Each structure stands twice: as structure tokens, then as C-alpha cells.
Amino acid sequence: MMTEPRQPKYQWGQEVRAAIDLYNDGSLPDIPEDQLLIVAGGPGEIVQIGHHTEANLPMYMVDFGLCVLGCLEEEIVLAALDAADEVAP
């Protein structure tokens, strides 16, 4: 049975922030593997949305300025929501 791909939660062009520290998983060959690339809270913009076939999950290409990384939904948060969370009630 074929499972339908999960629909992306975020859209192209949205401003996001890294939800966690992001490290090189080997996808950037000129940078040592496991090197910290973007600290949690680092700002970025979704520049493309793809799909991880094996995991059946949306993948987001996020331009963090220093580099463009492929991120899962759990690794990013909307910048607008992040800013709203920081406002005291």
C-alpha cells in the first residue's frame, strides 16, 4: 500500500529560525563533519520544499545566509511564532 506524502507545514519564502543547533551531517563536503553550522535561533528563509522519499517527510531547503541546509520540520520554527513566544503577556 502506498502512503500519501505528508503535506508541508511551512511554505516557500517563510522566515524561519533553527529550532535546534544544526551540525554538518556530511552534506557539506568542505566543512568537517559534525561541525556546528547554525546555532538554535539562527534566522533563515525557506528557499525550496522537497520530499524525503524513504522517511515520507517534507524537507526544507533553508538559506541561513552562511549556508543552505536541508531541514526537517522538527529542526525549524516560524520566525513570527518564535518572536511572538518571546513577548511577555
Image (cartoon, rainbow, N blue to C red):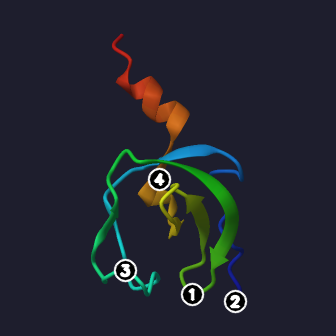
Q: Is residue 78 visible?
A: yes
Secondary structure under tag 2 reads loop
> Mark 2–mark 4 contact, CB under 8 Å?
no
Task: Give the alpha-carbon distance from disc 3 to disc 4, as whole Å.
Answer: 22 Å
For marks 2 and 4 on the same chain, the one whose residue lies earlier in the sequence: 2
Q: Quadrant of residue 15?
A: top right
Q: Whole-percent x and y of residue 28? A: 45, 81
Q: On residue 31, which mark appears? A: 3
Residue identified by numbered label 4 = 76
Q: Whole-percent x and y of residue 20? A: 33, 55
Residue identified by numbered label 1 = 54
For marks 1 and 2 on the same chain, the one whose residue lies earlier in the sequence: 2
Task: Give the alpha-carbon distance from disc 2 to disc 4, as whole Å.
Answer: 31 Å
Q: Residues within 10 Å of mark 4 (few under 14, many from 20)?
A: many
For marks 1 and 3 on the same chain, the one whose residue lies earlier in the sequence: 3
Residue identified by numbered label 2 = 1
Residue at image coords 57%, 58%? 63
What amino acid type should be assigned to the residue bearing mark 1?
A: Glu
Secondary structure under tag 1 reads loop
- Indicate the quadrant containing the N terminus: top left, top right, bottom left or bottom right: bottom right
What amino acid type should be assigned to the residue bearing mark 3?
A: Ile
Camera-side mark, 3 or 2: 3
